[in-house]
Amino acid sequence: MLNLFYITGLCESTMTHHFLQADVCSDRLVVKPDQLIKRRGKLGLVGVNLDLEGVKEWLQTRLMKETTVGKAKGILKNFLIEPFVAHKQEEEFYVCIYATREGDYMLFHHEGGVDVGDVDSKALKLLVGVDEKISADTVKSQLLTHAPADKKEMLISFLVGLFNMYEDLYFTYLEINPLVVTKDGVYVLDMAAKIDATADYLCKAKWGDVEFPPPFGREAYPEEAYIADLDAKSGASLKLTLLNPRGRIWTMVAGGGASVVYSDTICDLGGVNELANYGEYSGAPSEQQTYDYAKTILSLMTREKHPNGKVLIIGGSIANFTNVAATFKGIVRAIKDYQDPLKEHEVTIFVRRGGPNYQEGLRVMGEVGEFTTGIPIHVFGTETHMTAIVGMALGHRPIATQPRVAAHTANFLLNTSGGTTTPASSRSASFSEVKTGAENSSAQKTRAGLPPAKSTTLFSNHTKAIVWGMQTRAVQGMLDFDYVCSRQEPSVAAMVYPFTGDHKQKFYWGHKEILLPVYKNMADAMKKHPEVDVLISFASLRSAYDSTIETMQYPQIRTMAIIAEGIPEALTRKIIKMAEEKGVTIIGPATVGGIKPGCFKIGNTGGMLDNILASKLYRPGSVAYVSRSGGMSNELNNIISRTTDGVYEGVAIGGDRYPGSVFMDHVLRYQDTPGVKMIVVLGEIGGNEEYKICKGIKEGRITKPVVCWCIGTCATLFSSEVQFGHAGACANQASETALAKNKALEEAGAFVPKSFDELGDVIKSVYDNLVAKGVIMPAKEVPPPTVPMDYSWARELGLIRKPASFMTSICDERGQELIYAGMPITEVFKSEIGLGGTLGLLWFQRRLPRYACQFIEMCLMVTADHGPAVSGAHNTIVCARAGKDLISSLTSGLLTIGDRFGGALDAAAKQFSKAFDSGMLPMEFVNKMKKDGKLIMGIGHRVKSINNPDMRVQILKDFVKQHFPAAQLLDYALEVEKITTSKKPNLILNVDGFIGVAFVDLLRNCGGFTRDEADEFVEIGALNGIFVLGRSMGFIGHYLDQKRLKQGLYRHPWDDISYVLPEHMTM
């Protein structure tokens, strides 16, 4: 009997046929849409207790029809048809399980169904804490007090099993309404659920193939699937959601937080109905990945014209580690490829970006518009507020025409000082910092019977860290920051990398080279560096949990930064619980880290030195901030440095749903830190942590000025739900929206701007007020010490040049696709040139004719082996039987190749070519070689003769005569063979000689080489390579054969050795 029947995308004409194909045996049925629509019963979208004809009639009025659910309009395409379960109203119950930071809540109400009402206030709740187990007794006592007595045992069994399944399969939400319990059993009549997609690597086998459909009201587009596939194959982040493909405003934004801010600003300025897409690219995508992403956007936006033309906003915050110029190369390639459609659709492009090498990226982007394509491209850097280009694009503010600052990354980095010691500190303290003993103290002492207390001060200018992972670029960035901050010692004490043995890694400290230890295991690192109290983990999402749990076994660690994005939420909550128990502060996951100017920075935080210096992060200011987004934290560094005396400390807590530390943790630290005079918080949609700040302000726990803005205000304007770049950026209820939180913060007394555009103005206003009151006393600015530029980065910027150690012209593996002599590997396979054609590319840098490729392959086949008796095979066999490995045995055989064995191809080609080219007759050639006492290479065979011909030679000869355009040298060699065999029948043209002369004919007559080029390949030994490559196959075969036959050590028999010692030695 069929319990569930699924209908998708049907029309009336095919519906009857589809029903006939299904074995619907139940007399009474239920039908409902299956398109992520909640409360279908309330919306009249459930057909109950219908027969088959009734289901057909019900579907005819709804199938493929547009309907409205909330703000969303969509087509009803997919339906579930299932058997109707007869039951009474009192047999309906409600159950829901959902995840929170502290554990999972199970809600139960004894009255379920369509009219269940406000379950949050009516249902009984049970909290199952992180790492705790649910029990039957707890379920009975806390959830089933109002449940019918005769159904309690059945409900207990079901609810306990349901919760265990929820945990095992990494659900984050699971609601059943109604849950029907009759005397016959338990029935799930309707269910809504969410699973944690990041747990795919743990649950793939249990989940099977799971598709994540778009929310109701938004179609699934193939371009979205294409970008999702690119994202899955990349270490970077690539996201695309189409909102309105006919819209005129398109975005291509770098960074999860920045992408939300740009969408907010577009909506604030009235562009919500014209916003075509939401998306982001981040995490240092390659040039090819950026090109693929950009061309997808450009393809979509040039399909339909708009009467007002279109705008493309290529925006982003200041990157921490992404090479902006490299990613812009991909975008520039896409713009060049689509320049005609872009001009036809009257597209104007606005660009704003900052970060490593951004000046070069902006220059290239500007030139492609002005000089190459003629497309209007307006380019701005960090001197322009991040979202100012939105107002320009939408016509709300004039397009700035002032010339950009002609700054180059190099201007900040070149060392002009002659000193070799660490420079004196440029500023000993914050502008208004009050020195206290607590500033340099470590964690407070543990109180008896309580968990260890967390530190108010996480970092000082004496902080030492261990870095987990071979992140040499990030470590060097930390050391450069230390140097420019005038620290006496590097902040990185050691690195841990389990995939290599203990060793030393070279880094720079200013201009000097230093060595940092790298340990294979954490225990050794902790034991040898007891001064370390910070761990920075660059472990992958798969290993981050295990390495974090291991680290927290060492009580010396008080602060941890977890950089990885995509750790399953259930595992993150376990990390948080353990950290709370041990008094460890967690920054992350999914973060770039944090920075304390003048003291310490985590990994890539703050970007490269040019941004560190431009944002004055080498010395403390008076403003502390906390943000979710790493990219936006760098933007805050820029904003705060331009509007105040600078940053005192900044932390990006991470974009995941459950960050290890929350806003309030850091706001309270800042409140208790004398050097902090004002606090900036950049919140976002999702969660309710901002309300704790409201409470702290109202209760007087927070007295310092707080400037706060929550991003994601655009979400309430969209007709369907959009998952933003951060996993936690999703509102599950009205109070979690950015609008609600901004309103609450303003009412509580925080300084809340009207939009992100005005954030800098509000920060400046609050700061100026504190200066006017004397709370902040600006100090005189002192230039920071300089740091030499890394050689590799100087080359990247084009500041220096150096002759390369190697030159190559046959292969390039640096791009997205491997290239053989200018031919992409995909084209190699599409063209079906085979092994011969591949050899032609790599050896001769030519795409050879088809017959030439076939001839090469035939040569490899006929030279592959000639039995075990020849010297090369013999050596390989002896070596294999001595227990040596494949490479050693193969090499042993190859070393026997020379003029006497197998190496006659080159020599034969040279001898015959020289004789032929000099006009010498075949008889003259034979007589001269005899007179000179030299053998004619390629002539003669031990076994084969004119009467017992070598079939290998015959096969090759037939092919050459049939396919080669000319074979003059071969004809010459065959005339020589007639002369030599007349003297002795085994003096035939052997396979080496044949391949040698035929290959010369091929090179000279195929049309791909000049005469000089053909002669050069013969001279440099290319032809012997044919024998070496071919015979290697045979040698490997002999090696494998001996291993398979388990042959023992070879010892040559005495009776096959003639012992001829001197006579006087035998007496």
Image (cartoon, rainbow, N blue to C red):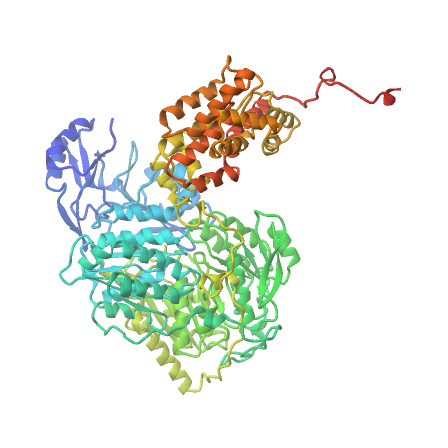
Residue drawn at x 41%, y 79% as measured from the top left: 644
Name the residue located 42 percent from the left edge and 33 percent from the top edge.
1002
Where 58 sits versus 699, above or below?
A: above
Toward the top, the furthest residue is 947
**Measured from the top left, where is residue 852 in percent x and y?**
39, 32
Nearer to the camera, 465 or 36: 465
Q: Position of residue 817 (x, y in %)?
A: 39, 46
Seen in the picture, residue 271 relative to 1011 is either above or below; the reply is below
Q: Quadrant of the C terminus?
A: top right
Residue 118 in sight here: no
Identify which residue, 69 or 406, lies in the foreground: 406
Asked if residue 526 can be seen in this view, the reply is yes
Q: Nearer the viewer, residue 349 or 58?
A: 349
Q: How many numbered circles does the render carry?
A: 0
Describe residue 875's horizontal placement relative to residue 820 as left or right: right
Q: Position of residue 154 (x, y in %)?
A: 35, 37
Quick one: quadrant of the N terminus?
top left
Q: Quadrant of residue 266?
A: bottom left
Q: Nearer the viewer, residue 544 or 293?
A: 293
Residue at screen point 42% across, 60% down: 323
How far across and how far down the image is residue 36, in percent? 25, 46
Is residue 53 left or right of 711 when viewed as pictured?
A: left
Q: Quadrant of residue 209?
A: top left
